[in-house]
Each structure stands twice: as C-alpha cells, then as structure tokens.
Image (cartoon, rainbow, N blue to C red):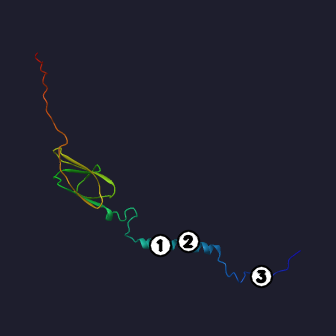
Amino acid sequence: MAHPPRDNDGKPRHSVGRVLDSRWMMAFSVLAVLVAIAWALIERGPTAQPPETRGVAATMATVELLGVPPGAEVLLDGRRIDNTLFGVAPGTRHALEVRDANGRSWRQVFLAEGSLSMVVELRMHFVEVEVSPTAPKAKED
C-alpha cells in the first residue's frame, strides 16, 4: 500500500532554514585555524625569544670575584671563564676554582641568589718537606 504524497516531500522545511553543506563547514574550520595561528604569531612578535630563554637574562644571579691575581685561571663548574664578573643560574649549586702559575689555588662551592661577591685568597694546598734518610743509631747500654 502506497502512502499518499505529502506537500513537503523533497523540499527543505522553512523552519530549519538553509543547511550549510559539509564542504563549507570544513572550509570554515580550516579558515578559523589559520586565523588563530596568524593571531598567535602576530601577538608573539618577530623579536620574541623562544620560551626556554625568555626572562633568563633578567633572572641570572651575578657573581663577582675580588682579588684574582693577573694571569690566574678561573674555572666555573670545570670550564674556564675569562671574566671575574659573570652570571649563573640561580638556585643551583656551582663550583669555582682559581689557580695561578705558582701552584696556589682557591676553591669554593656556592648557591647564588641575586648578586654575590667573593674574595679570592690563593693558598698552597700542599707542603713539600725534604727529608734526608739517616741510619738509625744503635742504643748504647
């Protein structure tokens, strides 16, 4: 048995309005993503630094070494540095060593927050003693 034809068969309903085609919805989604990416790049700016280096220079702890003799070798965490004023990452432990050509040295382990000044006093860490062997004397009874 066949149903009688209805007036709205095959025609869009007036209450629903126009339905967007799925291709238009996909195009609109892609356009929205591209606009969001462009907006983020514009907000970041061309001179922005990567997130891991942003603000690092502003939060470095400053260390100054006083009394370092000319020509002395300065080592920070085992690496040679050429300055007596330098920056380090705050909140981490660092080791300093200063050595001169005469064999004198100075060592210090520190945890820097803000700025720090250290006075370097080079000292000999070993003592050379010259001993001449002598035969033991026999005790006389």
Which quadrant is the N terminus positioned in?
bottom right
Q: What amino acid type is highlighted by mark number 1? A: Ala
Q: What amino acid type is highlighted by mark number 2? A: Val
Number of other residues with Cα within 10 Å of mark 2, as a class: few under 14, some 14 to 19, many 20 or more: few
- Provide the residue designation for mark 1: 38
The percent coordinates of residue 54 (x first, y second) are 37, 65
Secondary structure beneath label 3: loop
Find the residue positioned furthest to the left: 140
Camera-nearest residue between 33 and 122: 122
Instruction: Left or right? Give the position of 30 relative to 56.
Output: right
Examine the image and state in which quarter residue 42 appears.
bottom left
Secondary structure beneath label 1: helix
- Provide the residue designation for mark 2: 30
Instruction: Left or right? Give the position of 93 relative to 85.
Output: right
Secondary structure beneath label 2: helix
Q: CA distance from mark 2 to mark 1?
A: 12 Å
Number of other residues with Cα within 10 Å of mark 1, as a class: few under 14, some 14 to 19, many 20 or more: few
Find the residue positioned furthest to the top: 141
Label 3 near label 2: C-beta < 8 Å?
no
Camera-nearest residue between 86 and 133: 133
Residue at 77%, 82% (x, y): give it.
8
Q: CA distance from mark 2 to mark 3?
A: 35 Å
